[in-house]
Structures are given as structure tokens and as C-alpha cells.
Amino acid sequence: MARSARYRLLLPRLTELRRHLLPATFDPTRPYSPRAVDRIRGYRLLAHAELEACIEDLVTATVTTAWTRWCVDSRPRTCLMALVAYYQGDLGGPPETLTPKQASKKVLLHLRDRVDRARNHHVNVVVRGNNGIKEQNLLALLLPVGIHEVDIDKTWLATIDSFGGRRGDAAHQSGRTQQPPDPQQELATVTAIATGLSSLDARLLQLANA
């Protein structure tokens, strides 16, 4: 399975976080110290940030590559068609009249402008304004670039959605009484999410280069 350079950067970073923040060995029979518990929560927050940044970068790269290639060869691309289909801005209808000498030029510029506006909106508004990896966030990022519902594993989606919710708990309720996090479970969840992301990474590569 093909992997992007960006996805390949994610894996050693997650390994680094595991080494820096999680206990070297897991012992569920003994409570972890307050320092260890804070580090486990820190692992959850930083792993979430790395996964979120990776997904956003993969989407941006897909859109940028598809756009650049289309500007060169004008071949229809699923990614760009999806962007226009999901774009909610006011593109307006076709022009009412074109002068004969400029007809082909105006049509080409008009089409490119429509696609460019959809592209700019997704990269500069949706991706940059994204704040999380819950199901709603992921669908807003992925569907408009050509990812189909069948491309997304439902178990993986439920796992990352739950992890996104627990990230909020760690960020906003860390000082309150909570069930101490299980470092072994945290590692297993992050590993499962990163592994499942590889198939989406491969599909995004296809969409970028199709």
C-alpha cells in the first residue's frame, strides 16, 4: 500500500510521544503516580494534535496536487468535482451571453474560477478552521475531496470519534476528579487510529494523482 511522505512522518512522531510520555512498562495492578497520570493525559493531547495535523495536511496536499495537475492538463478529477459539489458558496449560473471571439477563453476562465473558489474555501476555511477529529470534523474534511462513505471504515471512525471526545475531557477537565487514564489503552487506541489512517492516506494519494 502506497504511503505519503506526510503519513510516514506521523509514525515516528507517535513513537517518540510514546517513549517520552507513557510508562516504560504497563502494570494495571498498581496505581500510577500523579506525575505519570499527567504524562498519560499529555500523551492523549499531543497524539490527538499530531493525528489532527496529519489528516489536515493530507487533505490540503490532495487538493493542491489535484488542482495543480488540472491546471496543466484540464482532465476531470474526482477530487475537484467533489469540491465543487460540496461547496456551498454562491457560484451563480452560467453567463447570459458571450462574444464569439472570446467565447472559449471566457468559458475556461469561468470554470477555473468556480473550481478555484471551491478549492480556496476548503483549504483556507474548512481545513484551517478545523478543530478536532470527531466524526463531524472528519466528514467535513474528507467527503468534499472525493472520499466516499465506503472508503471510511466504520469501526475506525467510531474509534477516532471516541478518542476525539476523550481528548476534550483531558483538555478541559484534567484538574477534576476523573477515572485515571489507562496508558496501555491509550497506546492501543492511538496505534489503531494511525494504522487505520493508512488506507485513507492511500486513497487520498490516488485522488491527488488520478
Image: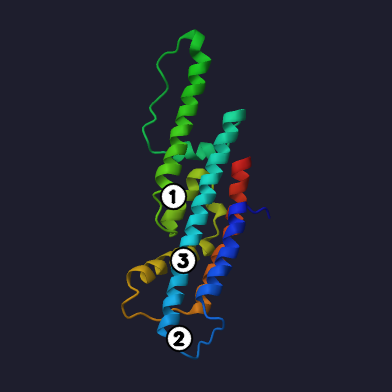
Q: Residue at x 45, y 88 (%)?
A: 31
Residue 91: x %, y % from top left: 39, 30
Would you say residue 112 is visible in this rendering? yes
Nearest to N terminus: mark 2 or mark 3:
2
Image height check: is 47 above or below 26?
A: above
Image quarter in which the C terminus is found:
top right
The Cα atoms of the two marked residues, 2 and 3, are separated by: 20 Å
**Which mark is nearer the camera, 1 or 3?**
3
Q: Name the colouring of the figure.
A: rainbow
Q: Residue furthest right?
A: 1
Would you say residue 148 is visible in this rendering? no
Q: Amino acid at mark 2?
A: Tyr
Which residue matches tag 1? 140
Which residue matches tag 3? 46
Q: Residue at x 50, y 40 (%)?
A: 82
Nearest to N terminus: mark 1 or mark 3:
3
Q: Are marks 1 and 2 in contact (CB under 8 Å)?
A: no
Which residue matches tag 2? 32
Image quarter in which the N terminus is found:
bottom right
Q: Is 167 displayed left or right of 102 in the figure?
A: left
Q: Residue at x 46, y 70 (%)?
A: 44
The Cα atoms of the two marked residues, 1 and 2, are separated by: 38 Å
Q: Quick one: SS at disc 1?
A: helix
Crowd class of label 1 (few under 14; some 14 to 19; many from 20; radius 10 Å) = some
Q: Quarter of the image holding residue 192?
A: bottom right
Q: Quick one: SS at disc 3?
A: helix
Q: Amino acid at mark 3?
A: Leu
